Image (cartoon, helix red, strand yellow):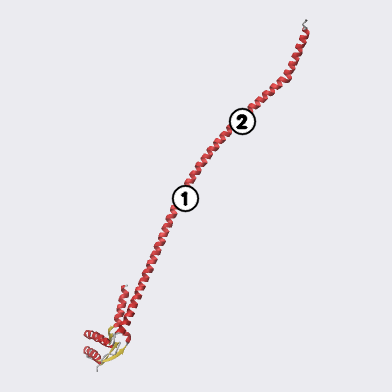
């Protein structure tokens, strides 16, 4: 069997041409495309990581703010409660004072009215006692008793004259 | 001439002549220079007792006046 060197050379050249063409036209662009894709993926991953990091930071910040807000809210509520309690105590004290003053005023007025009524009643009673006494004495004294009384009084008067 | 001295006697009933005489004599004894003219007034409102007015002098021993004094004292003590 003869080795056809020319044929081998031709085939070698042909292969080289095909390889060169494939390398130039297909392999390199594909490699380039893969590289670009890898770069894009890497960039995408990086961007995703950054986004995740940012989100985590934001979440942390949000949690922190939330906590601070809760704290502030609790503080404001506590202060409001303390203030309300103080105000309620003041109002109650003022109301008690006012009620006491009103009560004292009413009691004083009532006492005054009572005293006036009592005095009036006593005076009315004195008037009644005297009126009844006058009537009873006038009716109970007969002529004889009248004369005797006049004699007694007359004796005293004449002595003083 | 003797001057006239008016004596008014007020009582709830009419005085007896003896009582009138007693009064007249007592006043005359005190006012010898005057002639006593006694006027008797019956006033049931005095209730009992007697009130004698000699000139400007007044002696009140009526039950009404005593009660009035008592009334006044009672009112003042309240």
Is residue A24 placed above or below A73 in the rendered structure? above
Q: Position of residue B9 (x, y in %)?
A: 28, 88
Is residue B78 found left or right of B24 in the rendered image? right
- Helix, strand or loop at label 2? It is helix
- Helix, strand or loop at label 1? It is helix
> Which residue lies most toward the front here?
A1
Chain designation of label 2? A
Q: Closest to the observer: A19 or A72?
A: A19
- Quickly name the residue at label 1: A84
Sequence-first disc among 2 and 1: 2
Is residue A109 placed above or below A66 in the rendered structure? below
| Residue under the image location 60 percent in, 31 percent down | A50
* Rendered image quadrant of residue B71: bottom left
* Rendered image quadrant of residue A16: top right
Is residue A63 found left or right of B59 in the rendered image? right
Is residue B24 found left or right of A17 in the rendered image? left
Q: Are marks 2 and 1 on the same chain?
A: yes
Q: Position of residue A73 (x, y in %)?
A: 51, 44
> Which residue lies most toward the top here?
A1
Q: Position of residue A40 (x, y in %)?
A: 66, 27
- Quickly name the residue at label 2: A48
Q: Closest to the observer: A121 or B55?
A: A121
Q: Position of residue A89 (x, y in %)?
A: 43, 52
Is residue A120 found left or right of A28 in the rendered image? left
| Residue under the image location 58 percent in, 34 percent down | A55
Chain designation of label 1? A
| Residue under the image location 31 percent in, 77 percent down | B72
* Rendered image quadrant of residue A42: top right
Location of the C terminus of chain B (image quadrant): bottom left
Badge 1 local density, few (<14 within 10 Å), some, or many (20+)? few
Distance CA(mark 2)–CA(mark 1): 52 Å
């Amino acid at each position: 069997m003869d080795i056809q060197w020319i044929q081998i050379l031709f085939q070698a050249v042909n292969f080289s041409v095909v390889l060169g063409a494939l390398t130039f036209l297909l392999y390199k662009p594909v490699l380039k495309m893969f590289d670009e894709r890898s770069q894009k993926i890497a960039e995408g991953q990086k961007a995703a990581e950054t986004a995740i990091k940012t989100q985590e930071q934001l979440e942390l910040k949000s949690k922190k703010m939330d906590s601070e807000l809760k704290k502030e809210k609790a503080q404001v509520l506590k202060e409001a409660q303390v203030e309300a309690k103080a105000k309620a105590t003041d109002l109650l004290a003022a109301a008690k004072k006012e009620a006491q003053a009103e009560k004292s005023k009413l009691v004083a007025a009532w006492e005054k009215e009572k005293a006036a009524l009592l005095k009036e009643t006593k005076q009315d009673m004195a008037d009644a006692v005297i009126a009844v006494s006058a009537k009873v004495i006038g009716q109970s004294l007969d002529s004889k008793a009248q004369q005797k009384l006049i004699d007694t009084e007359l004796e005293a008067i004449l002595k003083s004259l | 001439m003797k001057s006239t001295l008016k004596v008014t006697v007020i009582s709830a009933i009419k005085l007896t002549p003896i009582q009138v005489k007693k009064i007249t004599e007592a006043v005359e004894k005190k006012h010898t220079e005057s002639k006593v003219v006694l006027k008797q007034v019956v006033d049931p409102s005095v209730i009992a007792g007697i009130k004698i007015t000699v000139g400007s002098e007044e002696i009140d021993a009526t039950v009404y006046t005593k009660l009035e004094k008592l009334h006044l004292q009672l009112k003042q003590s309240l």
